[in-house]
Image: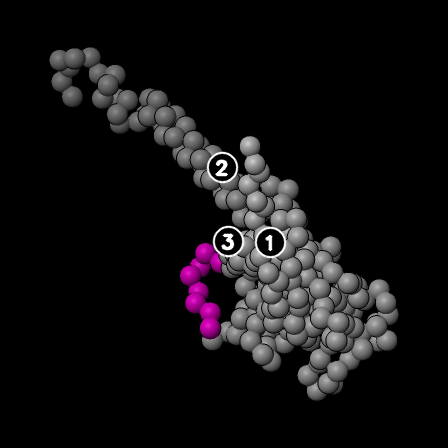
Amino acid sequence: MSKKPRRPPPPGVTLHGVFLNVRGIGVLLRGASGVGKSELALELLTRGHRLIADDAADFSYQKNQVIGRCPPILKGFIEARSLGIVNVRRLYGERALSASAVLDLVITLDAPQTIEETGMERLSGRRGQCEVLGVMIPEVSIPIRLGHNLAVLVEAACGDLELRRRGYHADEDLSRRQLKEIRKEERGRNVETDVSIASPTHPMRRRSDKTPGTPS
Protein backbone atom coordinates (compact mmCIF):
# COMPACT_ATOMS: atom_id res chain seq x y z
CA MET A 1 0.00 0.00 0.00
CA SER A 2 1.45 3.33 -1.01
CA LYS A 3 1.79 6.00 1.65
CA LYS A 4 -0.32 9.10 1.41
CA PRO A 5 1.75 12.13 0.50
CA ARG A 6 2.55 14.30 3.50
CA ARG A 7 0.66 17.56 3.66
CA PRO A 8 3.07 20.40 2.84
CA PRO A 9 3.58 22.88 5.69
CA PRO A 10 1.79 26.21 5.32
CA PRO A 11 3.92 29.05 4.00
CA GLY A 12 5.48 31.51 6.38
CA VAL A 13 3.91 34.81 7.33
CA THR A 14 5.14 38.17 8.58
CA LEU A 15 3.07 39.76 11.35
CA HIS A 16 3.19 43.33 12.57
CA GLY A 17 4.05 43.69 16.24
CA VAL A 18 6.80 43.16 18.78
CA PHE A 19 7.89 39.60 19.47
CA LEU A 20 9.56 38.86 22.80
CA ASN A 21 10.63 36.05 25.07
CA VAL A 22 8.96 36.70 28.44
CA ARG A 23 9.59 34.10 31.14
CA GLY A 24 10.30 31.55 28.44
CA ILE A 25 7.00 32.33 26.69
CA GLY A 26 7.03 33.64 23.12
CA VAL A 27 4.74 36.70 23.19
CA LEU A 28 3.61 38.76 20.23
CA LEU A 29 2.47 42.26 21.23
CA ARG A 30 -0.08 43.59 18.77
CA GLY A 31 -2.08 46.79 18.49
CA ALA A 32 -2.62 49.86 16.36
CA SER A 33 0.34 51.97 15.34
CA GLY A 34 1.39 54.33 18.12
CA VAL A 35 -0.42 52.40 20.86
CA GLY A 36 2.85 51.85 22.74
CA LYS A 37 4.07 48.37 21.80
CA SER A 38 7.74 49.32 21.48
CA GLU A 39 7.70 51.36 24.68
CA LEU A 40 6.21 48.38 26.50
CA ALA A 41 8.91 46.18 24.97
CA LEU A 42 11.61 48.52 26.32
CA GLU A 43 10.09 48.27 29.79
CA LEU A 44 10.11 44.47 29.53
CA LEU A 45 13.76 44.54 28.43
CA THR A 46 14.69 46.50 31.54
CA ARG A 47 12.97 43.75 33.56
CA GLY A 48 15.26 41.09 32.11
CA HIS A 49 13.19 39.75 29.21
CA ARG A 50 14.43 39.33 25.63
CA LEU A 51 13.60 40.93 22.32
CA ILE A 52 13.25 38.81 19.21
CA ALA A 53 11.79 41.27 16.71
CA ASP A 54 10.37 44.78 16.71
CA ASP A 55 7.80 46.10 14.23
CA ALA A 56 7.64 42.85 12.24
CA ALA A 57 8.36 39.19 12.92
CA ASP A 58 8.68 36.30 10.47
CA PHE A 59 6.78 33.15 11.48
CA SER A 60 7.06 29.64 10.07
CA TYR A 61 5.37 26.33 10.79
CA GLN A 62 7.64 23.64 12.26
CA LYS A 63 6.63 20.39 13.96
CA ASN A 64 3.12 21.54 14.87
CA GLN A 65 4.44 24.81 16.26
CA VAL A 66 4.75 28.37 15.02
CA ILE A 67 8.32 29.67 15.27
CA GLY A 68 9.06 33.39 15.15
CA ARG A 69 12.28 35.12 14.11
CA CYS A 70 13.43 38.61 13.29
CA PRO A 71 13.98 39.68 9.68
CA PRO A 72 17.79 39.94 9.34
CA ILE A 73 17.77 43.65 8.50
CA LEU A 74 15.87 44.52 11.72
CA LYS A 75 17.73 42.21 14.11
CA GLY A 76 18.82 43.93 17.31
CA PHE A 77 17.02 47.22 16.70
CA ILE A 78 13.88 48.70 18.18
CA GLU A 79 12.07 51.93 17.34
CA ALA A 80 11.05 54.05 20.33
CA ARG A 81 8.83 57.09 20.12
CA SER A 82 10.78 60.33 20.58
CA LEU A 83 14.08 58.40 20.58
CA GLY A 84 14.09 56.91 17.12
CA ILE A 85 16.08 53.72 16.50
CA VAL A 86 17.72 52.06 19.50
CA ASN A 87 20.41 49.38 19.31
CA VAL A 88 19.26 46.87 21.91
CA ARG A 89 22.52 44.90 21.99
CA ARG A 90 24.63 47.98 22.68
CA LEU A 91 22.16 49.44 25.17
CA TYR A 92 21.13 46.35 27.15
CA GLY A 93 23.71 43.73 26.20
CA GLU A 94 23.64 40.43 24.34
CA ARG A 95 21.38 38.81 26.93
CA ALA A 96 18.55 41.17 25.93
CA LEU A 97 18.22 39.46 22.55
CA SER A 98 16.92 36.07 21.49
CA ALA A 99 17.19 34.57 18.01
CA SER A 100 13.81 32.81 17.92
CA ALA A 101 10.95 31.44 20.01
CA VAL A 102 7.77 29.43 19.73
CA LEU A 103 4.72 31.66 19.45
CA ASP A 104 2.83 30.83 22.65
CA LEU A 105 0.71 33.90 23.29
CA VAL A 106 -0.66 36.94 21.47
CA ILE A 107 -1.36 40.03 23.55
CA THR A 108 -3.40 42.76 21.90
CA LEU A 109 -3.21 46.28 23.30
CA ASP A 110 -6.62 47.92 22.90
CA ALA A 111 -7.41 51.62 23.00
CA PRO A 112 -10.03 52.37 25.71
CA GLN A 113 -12.65 53.68 23.28
CA THR A 114 -12.70 50.35 21.40
CA ILE A 115 -13.60 48.26 24.48
CA GLU A 116 -17.06 46.96 25.29
CA GLU A 117 -17.53 46.03 28.95
CA THR A 118 -19.61 42.93 29.71
CA GLY A 119 -18.65 42.28 33.32
CA MET A 120 -17.38 38.74 32.61
CA GLU A 121 -13.86 40.03 31.97
CA ARG A 122 -13.51 40.67 35.71
CA LEU A 123 -13.66 36.90 36.27
CA SER A 124 -12.23 35.33 33.12
CA GLY A 125 -10.32 38.21 31.56
CA ARG A 126 -10.37 39.08 27.89
CA ARG A 127 -9.31 35.77 26.44
CA GLY A 128 -9.67 34.23 23.05
CA GLN A 129 -7.71 32.55 20.30
CA CYS A 130 -6.27 33.59 16.97
CA GLU A 131 -5.10 31.40 14.12
CA VAL A 132 -1.53 31.68 12.87
CA LEU A 133 -0.42 29.28 10.12
CA GLY A 134 -3.22 26.90 11.00
CA VAL A 135 -2.34 26.79 14.70
CA MET A 136 -4.69 28.23 17.34
CA ILE A 137 -2.76 30.57 19.62
CA PRO A 138 -4.12 31.86 22.97
CA GLU A 139 -4.85 35.58 22.88
CA VAL A 140 -5.33 38.10 25.67
CA SER A 141 -6.62 41.64 25.11
CA ILE A 142 -5.37 44.30 27.51
CA PRO A 143 -7.04 47.72 27.53
CA ILE A 144 -4.69 50.68 27.83
CA ARG A 145 -5.79 52.76 30.78
CA LEU A 146 -4.12 55.49 32.79
CA GLY A 147 -2.20 53.99 35.70
CA HIS A 148 -2.00 50.46 34.32
CA ASN A 149 1.42 48.83 34.57
CA LEU A 150 1.36 46.99 31.26
CA ALA A 151 4.71 45.26 31.80
CA VAL A 152 3.41 43.64 35.00
CA LEU A 153 0.22 42.58 33.21
CA VAL A 154 2.23 40.96 30.39
CA GLU A 155 4.37 39.07 32.90
CA ALA A 156 1.26 37.95 34.77
CA ALA A 157 -0.40 36.82 31.52
CA CYS A 158 2.65 34.67 30.72
CA GLY A 159 2.71 33.16 34.20
CA ASP A 160 -1.03 32.47 34.02
CA LEU A 161 -0.56 30.74 30.65
CA GLU A 162 1.98 28.40 32.24
CA LEU A 163 -0.48 27.55 35.02
CA ARG A 164 -3.28 26.92 32.51
CA ARG A 165 -1.05 24.55 30.59
CA ARG A 166 -0.65 22.57 33.80
CA GLY A 167 -4.42 22.43 34.18
CA TYR A 168 -4.97 25.20 36.74
CA HIS A 169 -7.49 27.95 35.98
CA ALA A 170 -7.79 30.64 38.64
CA ASP A 171 -11.27 31.74 37.56
CA GLU A 172 -12.60 28.19 37.80
CA ASP A 173 -10.91 27.73 41.18
CA LEU A 174 -12.59 30.87 42.55
CA SER A 175 -15.97 29.82 41.12
CA ARG A 176 -15.66 26.42 42.84
CA ARG A 177 -14.81 28.11 46.14
CA GLN A 178 -17.78 30.44 45.87
CA LEU A 179 -20.14 27.58 45.01
CA LYS A 180 -18.79 25.54 47.92
CA GLU A 181 -19.36 28.46 50.30
CA ILE A 182 -22.90 29.03 48.98
CA ARG A 183 -23.78 25.36 49.50
CA LYS A 184 -22.25 25.48 52.99
CA GLU A 185 -24.40 28.48 53.89
CA GLU A 186 -27.50 26.79 52.46
CA ARG A 187 -26.87 23.66 54.54
CA GLY A 188 -26.41 25.85 57.61
CA ARG A 189 -29.74 27.59 57.00
CA ASN A 190 -31.48 24.24 56.50
CA VAL A 191 -30.08 22.93 59.81
CA GLU A 192 -31.21 26.09 61.62
CA THR A 193 -34.71 25.67 60.16
CA ASP A 194 -34.90 22.01 61.26
CA VAL A 195 -33.74 22.88 64.77
CA SER A 196 -36.23 25.72 64.99
CA ILE A 197 -39.16 23.50 63.95
CA ALA A 198 -38.08 20.83 66.44
CA SER A 199 -38.18 23.35 69.30
CA PRO A 200 -41.20 22.93 71.70
CA THR A 201 -41.90 26.65 71.46
CA HIS A 202 -42.27 26.62 67.68
CA PRO A 203 -45.95 27.17 66.65
CA MET A 204 -45.93 24.23 64.23
CA ARG A 205 -44.58 21.93 66.95
CA ARG A 206 -47.19 23.09 69.52
CA ARG A 207 -50.04 22.39 67.07
CA SER A 208 -48.70 18.94 66.22
CA ASP A 209 -48.28 18.04 69.94
CA LYS A 210 -51.97 18.66 70.82
CA THR A 211 -54.13 15.60 71.40
CA PRO A 212 -56.70 15.12 68.60
CA GLY A 213 -60.10 16.40 69.63
CA THR A 214 -58.65 18.64 72.36
CA PRO A 215 -60.14 22.10 72.07
CA SER A 216 -57.61 24.85 71.51
The answer to the question of whether label 2 and label 3 lie on touching residues, with beta carbons closer than 8 A, is: no
Q: Nearer the viewer, mark 1 or mark 2?
A: 1
Q: Is residue 176 left or right of residue 25?
A: left
Q: Is residue 170 left or right of residue 73?
A: left
Q: Residues within 10 Å of mark 1 (few under 14, many from 20)?
A: few
* Label 2 – label 3 distance at C-alpha: 17 Å
Task: Specify which label sits upstream in the sequence, 1 or 2.
Answer: 1
Residue underneath mark 1: 9
Q: Residue at x 53, y 58 (%)?
A: 131
Could you tell me which quadrant the N terminus lies in? top right
Could you tell me which quadrant the C terminus lies in? top left
Is residue 73 placed above or below 104 in the rendered structure?
A: below
The answer to the question of whether label 1 and label 2 lie on touching residues, with beta carbons closer than 8 A, is: no
Q: Residue at x 25, y 16 (%)?
A: 209
Q: Position of residue 63 (x, y in %)?
A: 66, 48
Q: Nearer the viewer, mark 2 or mark 3?
A: 3
Query: Front-most of 79 and 118?
Result: 79
Occupied quadrant, residue 41: bottom right
Residue underneath mark 3: 123
Query: Front-most of 181 and 160?
Result: 160
Occupied quadrant, residue 12: bottom right
Extent of the magenta region:
114-121
Is residue 215 placed above or below 19 in the rendered structure?
A: above
Q: Position of residue 25 (x, y in %)?
A: 69, 56
Task: Specify which label sits upstream in the sequence, 3 or 1.
Answer: 1
SS for callout 1: loop
The answer to whether one can see residue 140 in this image is yes
Residue 120 located within the stretch drawn in magenta: yes
